[in-house]
Amino acid sequence: MSVRLDELVGATREALHRRKGERPIAELEREAGSQPEGRPFAEALARPGTSVVAEHKRRSPSAGTIREGAVCADVVRAYDRGGAAAISVLTEEAHFGGSLADLREARAATELPILRKDFTIDPYQLYEAKAAGADAVLLVVGSIEPDELASLYREARALDLDAIVEVQREEELDIALEVDVDVLGINNRNLEDFSVDLQRTFDLLSDVPAGKVVVSESGIHYREQIEELEQVGVDAVLVGEVVMRAPDPEAAVRELTRAEEPTQA
């Protein structure tokens, strides 16, 4: 049975309410303030060619369990060796099986910039992300009101966190552009029925002004798709299930990035 976006956000609110009772925000603020300078996430996506953001995702509402017993650090190091430009770590618990512990583990395992992938709906989560070592957060336009998006975006930038602002349709793109965000994520997966259509990126890209970093998310399985997206100006792709399911995640990422194998010492 498919899980609608409002159910995902509802589960996030419940988990957030629990965590707020466990750790006061003042504690997170102190921990966030002691973190080293953030790694350049947006810059990694904007470098020449199409960057691959490789995602650690234990399960999803549409795919079920993806990689049983995955050790986050092992997966992330494989992605790094395969040529990923950045790492995405899903931290939503109820439907994706993630955690902030995964994020901290990823941070310790790689020097690549890291995205905390979750439904960010409250400033508390920004401080959680910063304290756990994230360099960027995800803001899904369809999950929050426009004024909340603007406020969260400003606060993220004040914390030295980049943000992927995710859209699915023209109205959401208009809202994101009104906020003047730097990095736009175009989700090819419909979060109401979980169908995937890569054409969504091509359709929305024509309305994105020059100077924005564009990330195409979901439905990307082959290098040929990445090359097609690169030709129309997409800066980066976010891939999760295809590399997470692969018997050899390093080789799967390398095939998408066409990175050369590291020379043996």
Image (spheres, helix red, strand yellow):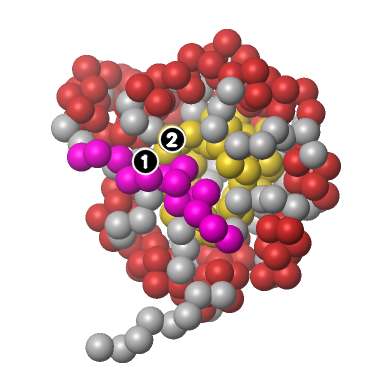
Residue under the image location 44 percent in, 28 percent down: 15
Q: Note whether 153 is above or below 228 in the view shown.
A: above
Q: Which residue is drawn at 54% across and 16% down?
A: 150
Q: Where is residue 259 in the image (x, y as percent from the top left)?
A: 50, 75
Please say if 239 is above or below 36.
below
Q: Which residue is drawn at 20% across and 27% down?
A: 33
User: Residue 135's mark?
Assistant: 1
Residue 235, how many percent across, how many down? 61, 51
Q: Is residue 174 left or right of residue 109?
A: right
Magenta segment:
36-49
> Which residue has dot 2 on it?
162
* Residue 146 in sight here: yes
Q: Does the magenta stretch include residue 37?
A: yes
Whether residues under marks 1 and 2 lie with C-beta atoms below 8 angstroms apart, the answer is yes
Q: Decide: is 88 above or below 263.
A: above
Q: Which residue is farthest top?
A: 147
